[in-house]
Image: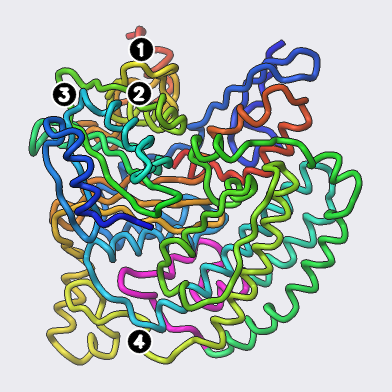
Amino acid sequence: MTINMGPQHPSTHGVLRLLLELDGETIIKAVPHVGFLHRGVEKLAEYRTYHQCIPLTDRLDYVAPFSNNLAYALTVEKLLGIEIPERAQHIRVLLCELTRIASHLLWLATHALDIGAMTVFFYCFREREAIYDIFEMVSGARMHTSYIRVGGVSRDLPGGFAERTHKFVMEFPSRLNEYETLLTENPIWKKRTVGVGIISAEDAIDYGLSGPSLRGSGVNWDIRKAEPYSRYDKYQFTVPLGKNGDVYDRYRIRIEEMHQSNEIVRQALNILPKGDFLARIPNVTLPPKEDVETIMESMITHFKLITDGIHPPKGEVYASIEAPKGELGFYLVSDGSSHPYRLKIRPPSFVNLEALPKMIEGRMLPDVVATIGSLDIVLGEIDR
Amino acid sequence: MPMKNEDLAALIKTKFPEAIMSIASFRNELTLTVKKDAVAEIAQFLKKNEALDFNFLSDLCGVDRIETDNVFDVVYHLYSLSKNHRLRLKASVSPDAPSLPTVTGVWKTANWHERETYDMFGITFEGHPDLRKILTPEDFEGHPLRKDYPLDGRQPATLRDIYRKDEA
């Protein structure tokens, strides 16, 4: 019997269609169909200046928008070959880790809700509200911040930021421990997740899995440690690993990653140096507003940058970061004009989803829901 | 330990002297352009050789360079988990016969990437187990990321155009 787990379904985390061939309740074959949220972001990027592409990237992994911005900015900065001031680097780390916490909180909320633990959903969203308030204080927007710029960030951190973030960082670990008491040793949770959705390490690497989905199978790869970007090498944190590659291991890993991200935010608040929040490179970054209003050359530079845009050298680069879901990479081909010639987005969820049939074939129907949740997919970046 | 780019290029060049068309380095990234027929063989070598050990295919995509050089590029981004080095592999196909061998036999993850490249550019991959569209709807015609495909699209604008196009 073939069942359609259609694009409209509360447990598919977006518009994902799964065609399941069943024998009773056992799954013989699963075919995912994606593309319901395809908006042509890569095509649109070819008609926008490099600056105008930043809001496009916000809407890829809409659960962790800041990390998409960061990956894009790092790619353009690599192409340009420019240096970013220290303060901007550490602000980026701080906000990226807050975004990782927010993304994992949403993962926990929806994953637990799918399996039946509704209380966790409300608790996690309460924490997310605190993070949204911090983002709104920094950039003006709760979710799609577009706070980052090529060369740094768009404006400095406001007064009161340090106190509010410090308060969050101090309260968060004990709250997270409370949520763990609901799930980690819960026999129902363990029955639903231990031994479910197993993928071996060799298969995981072959299928291109990355992030917590890969580390659940015991493969120790985290881009923040292997190819550090944006001053991550200055921070002390551990990367949790799993053993069995099942849903339970991936759950434990993400919970521990939230603790580690909290620790990184705490360190960032201490390390945060004074200085520029945006590099001063005349044909790349906008000049400061005071200069634009008083000095003629700055006004002309500002005008040219807004209307014409940056002109990077001809060439191609690939840069990737450890997004909450895995390796988020951008491949940028430039022909020297103010628009990207080709912007290819390597979305972690797209690649992770390909391994779903391997994880669920031979299992029962309820395991599909648990496995989709554990892969932590976001259709925005799968479909682009 | 990661190999230096020059050593990587030298090792691959000794093994495949005729298939490598150019070696380039930009922003500390190594790019090898190879002949399209040798792609599967080179991919197998890159994965199996112990010094290179490129066991992770990060990305596979197409680039439309018809206007400048009259080719489509297919670009592979490879990474070695054990050695922590990266490589970019490129192959060019002409628009009259846009087809090259698949690498799904080497890295299973190439499956969906190649489907997306087929969907967006029309490049076919010989030997692919299930080459069909992935992102655009089933009745979509055309390959949207080609440069000659307009941004607004060519699909019918209204339902009337779809369902009543035969009426006067």
Answer whether labels 3 and 4 touch (C-beta < 8 Å). no
Q: Is residue A303 visible?
A: yes
At x 60% / y 46%, what residue is drawn? A213
Q: Chain of mark 4?
A: A
- Name the element at disc 2: loop
Q: Which residue is disc 2 drawn over? A: B156
Split into 4 quadrants, where in the image is the C terminus of chain A? top left
* Disc 1 versus disc 3: nearer the observer: 3
- Please say if A30 is above or below A200: above
Q: Is residue A350 visible?
A: no
The residues bearing labels 1 and 3 have C-alpha atoms spaced at a distance of 32 Å
Q: How far across and how far down the image is residue A87, in percent?
A: 41, 83
At x 40% / y 40%, what residue is drawn? B57
Q: Which residue is disc 4 drawn over? A: A276
Residue span colored magenta: A132-158
Residues behind callouts 1 and 3 on a single chain: yes
Q: How far across and how far down the image is residue A255, in percent?
A: 71, 60
Identify which amino acid the numbered label 1 is placed on.
Lys
Pointer 3 local density, CA inside 10 Å: few below 14, some 14–19, many at least 20? some
Q: Which residue is disc 3 drawn over? A: B95
Q: How far across and how far down the image is residue A57, in percent?
A: 41, 55
Q: Which residue is disc 1 drawn over? A: B165
The residues bearing labels 1 and 4 have C-alpha atoms spaced at a distance of 60 Å
Pointer 2 local density, CA inside 10 Å: few below 14, some 14–19, many at least 20? few
At x 84% / y 54%, what residue is drawn? A183
